[in-house]
Amino acid sequence: MSAIVRVEVHEFEYAVQNLHRDGLAQTITYREGSRLPVSKYAVSIHTDDGGRGDYVTHWVASKSSLGQTLMLAPRLVGKDARERVAIYEDLKREIRQYDHMGHGALDIALWDWAGRRYGASISELLGGYRKRLPAYASTYHGDRAGGLSSKEAFADFAGQCHALGYRAFKIHGWNDGNAREEAANVAHVARAVGDRMTLMLDPACELRTFADALHVGRACDDAGFFWYEDPFRDGGTSAFAHRKLREMIRTPILQTEHVRGVEPKADFVLAGGTDLLRVDPEYDMGITGSLKIAHLAEALGLDCEIHASGPAHRHLMAAMRNTNFYEVALVGPKCPNLIPPVYACGYTDQLDCIDADGTVPVPEGPGLGVDYDWDWIARHRTALHTFQ
């Protein structure tokens, strides 16, 4: 037995240049000269035989998710770190009345622990075979401040991404939910780069009505978009509405980013609500939970697209056949990806992380294959929670 004797949760904060929160929805967009305070947290799991597993959150680190992680962390103490599936089942039940968003970081840290124990990367433990992953540039939302502030700006940025090596590009439009503006953007970007880039659209649930979603979906049809994701303000959770939308447009629908875990995703896809499944090891109860979703999609003959970026995401994708692109999220022409600068090993998910062949590498070291800068985390730490 490798008993877990201590779990640490490190809260920390840093600032990112040229980004701010836009409006009531708190969507992050470009603003020159602005400094956006960002809060994240790191998880560290220690066992009685000297083992350790770590994970630093990327996009999951809301106060709500942190609260759930703090609820779950004490449940790990005394458990055998090797028994990831048993721990997954216990934690899943423990927060069944919540959205499960605090679970993933703990599971990923356990996989990092396992990789370090056996001297193998998570990809190797999973039987992964991909060494490099085709990637797409996933934009910040449009702004009104001179960044992605027009359809011309989106097209220019797509061209910039193509010059870097990207062969796929996803648009997050404006927060206004203006269907005509979104449809015009789809058409313009397709005319500019559609002959050399795979294009996707994610309104991020900003379109206000089903009719708006249909209007923009038909623009995606005309422009030959690869997928259409989370179009309108049901929150991405209505299987019935998205089935109806699928019946009225040709562009494949990508849903379930906002549906947590394998059973609800199975219900959604079997109800006809999507063509492609979404999975995220931070959102979907870790690598353990994500594997179940990837296998669900494979059993149904569907592709399963990984949401967002990070070392855990790369290891997961390395072991999946039925997936197409790694999401470098979020990027813009005048602002950085706000993921935490915690890597002492050169790992990056910034815009320039891609090689000229349009791919990113899978880390090769034990566990996650990254070295965290714990001195930097300590300097920026705002709270430390220890359970033992």
Image (cartoon, rainbow, N blue to C red):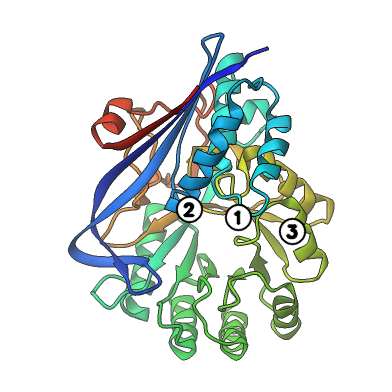
| Whether residue 363 is situated above or below residue 239 in the rendered picture | above
**Residue at which label 2 appears:** 64
**Residue at which label 1 appears:** 99
The picture quadrant where one finds residue 286 is top right
Q: Give me the residue at 43% from left, 75% from top.
A: 173
- Of the residues under marks 2 and 1, which one precedes in the sequence? 2
- Of the residues under marks 3 and 1, which one precedes in the sequence? 1
Q: Give me the residue at 42% from left, 51% from top.
A: 63
The amino acid on which the numbered mark 2 sits, given as a three-letter code, is Ser
| Whether residue 82 is situated above or below residue 163 in the rendered picture | above
**Secondary-structure class at tag 1:** loop
Q: Position of residue 81 (x, y in %)?
A: 63, 22
Judge left or right: residue 150 versus residue 58: left
Measured Cα–Cα span from mark 3 to mark 2: 21 Å
Q: Is residue 309 visible?
A: no
**Residue at which label 3 appears:** 264
The picture quadrant where one finds residue 146 is bottom left
The amino acid on which the numbered mark 1 sits, given as a three-letter code, is Asp
Measured Cα–Cα span from mark 2 to mark 1: 9 Å
| Whether residue 346 is situated above or below residue 60 in the rendered picture | above
Q: Quadrant of the N terminus?
A: top right
Q: Nearer the viewer, residue 267 or 383?
A: 383
Q: Which mark is residue 307?
A: none
Judge left or right: residue 219 versus residue 387: right
Q: Are marks 2 and 1 in contact (CB under 8 Å)?
A: yes
Q: Is residue 134 visible?
A: yes
